[in-house]
Amino acid sequence: MDDSYLIRTQTPIDRLSDDLLISILSRFSMTEAARTSVLARRWRYFWTNNRVLDFDAVRVLSQIEERDTTLHNERIRFVKWVNKVAMLHSYSTIDEFRISFDLDEGFDDHLDRWIQFAFRKRVKKLELNLVKSHHTHTQHKQYSFPNMSHGVSSIESLVTLILTNVDVTEEVLIFFVSNCPFLEELCVKGSNCLENLRTSRPAIRLRRLEIVDCRGFRSLKICSPNLISYTFHGTNIPMVLKNVASLVSLSLGAKFHGELILNMNKISRCLSQLETLTLRVSEFQGRGVILPIYPHLPRLKKLVIDICTIGFETSLLGFTRLINAAPSLREILLKITCSQPLFLATIPHYQGPMHQSLEVLQIEGFAGAKVDLELALYIVEHAVSLKKVVIDFRRPTGGEQCVEMEMEMARKGILLLEAKLPEGAELIIHE
């Protein structure tokens, strides 16, 4: 058989270079990439060169009962999977190393070794998401991220560090900020021991910073001239953002609206430069809630209000002050959860200035009750350029009769909104 015949029978994928095939496999999940080893002799070890190592087995946690297994057994299987891949991995560097699973303190040594492995491979993105599943019946101690000030080399390649349900200290974070010249993203969620984050010198490359639900967190002081996005969800704390002229996206969250307002006031000088603002309150209650009057939000284009309301007399109309202070606002997203029984009431017409730029209103969790319909009607009645209203219905809970009552209330709310739409505006409903 001559060579010309062999060339003609090759498939197009056979003509691709090894490097290109490895790059394609990096877009597969770890399990899918490993399966390609049986396709042909040439493919046998391609997956061991994968530069994206994403170990996400969260889906397994929801299948434990039907698989007739235990969380401990699945943890053992997960650890063996990661260890095998780490042992066989042959490429000199990796772009991403990600762990997403429920692991307790019995697996701390494995996590330590995986972190060492990732840094030996000069990892660019490191993410640990130690999920807390409902199968964990006892409160276990969270994994503590190791002190990196000695014994580890090649951390300077790190661009992104994301830690969820991992205990990490200020000392460790400052070490990364000070010694990783390319660090652009730093995200910490659910750490129990992080108390402060105070940098003594500018974090020059940092572009995104998130501190979310770290219950012991007490103060923040950071100087970051290239910071674009900042997220803080927590209690009222001393907060200093210095030299953040590039900041355009801000997300603030708190349990109560009073804490949210106090934190907004601390960084009010940054608000005029924002293009996106997200506000989240997990227990919003009160009829006379008034946000401070901000003189001008000239660049704001998107406003997200993420609220869980409690109580029968809750009103969200206080947020109209933000809307009226943002003349360039194009889009509003309302994400509303109601923890109390809902009721429909007569909604009066509220006076206010007309908004000239708002084009899109999206409501997630729409129930047609007074708490969400009141604000939605205000926006629709005062947005003269509105082009589209997108509504996702609230998912009703309870018995069949309760569900039918809530759905009927939502349908009535839709009719009221539809009657107030400006001419030419489109109503899109997702049920």
Image: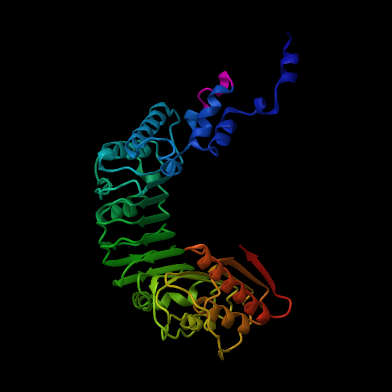
The percent coordinates of residue 189 (x first, y second) are: 35, 56
Picture coordinates of residue 103, whole percent (x, y): 32, 42
Residue found 57% across the figure and 76% down from its top: 329
Picture coordinates of residue 33, whole percent (x, y) = 52, 32
Of 309 and 209, nearer the camera is 309
Extreme residue in the top direction = 1
Image side of residue 410 versus residue 199, left or right: right
> In which quadrant will I find the C terminus?
bottom right
User: Residue 68 vs residue 421: left or right?
Assistant: left
Question: In the rendered picture of this protein, how many numbered marks are placed on residues?
Answer: 0
Residue furthest to the bottom in view is: 351
* 401 and 162: which is toward the camera: 401
Where residue 350 sits: x, y (%)? 55, 89
Could you tell me which residue is drawn at 53 percent across and 33 percent down?
Answer: 32
Q: Is residue 225 visible?
A: no
Q: Residue furthest front?
A: 401
Q: Where does the magenta region start and end? A: 40-46
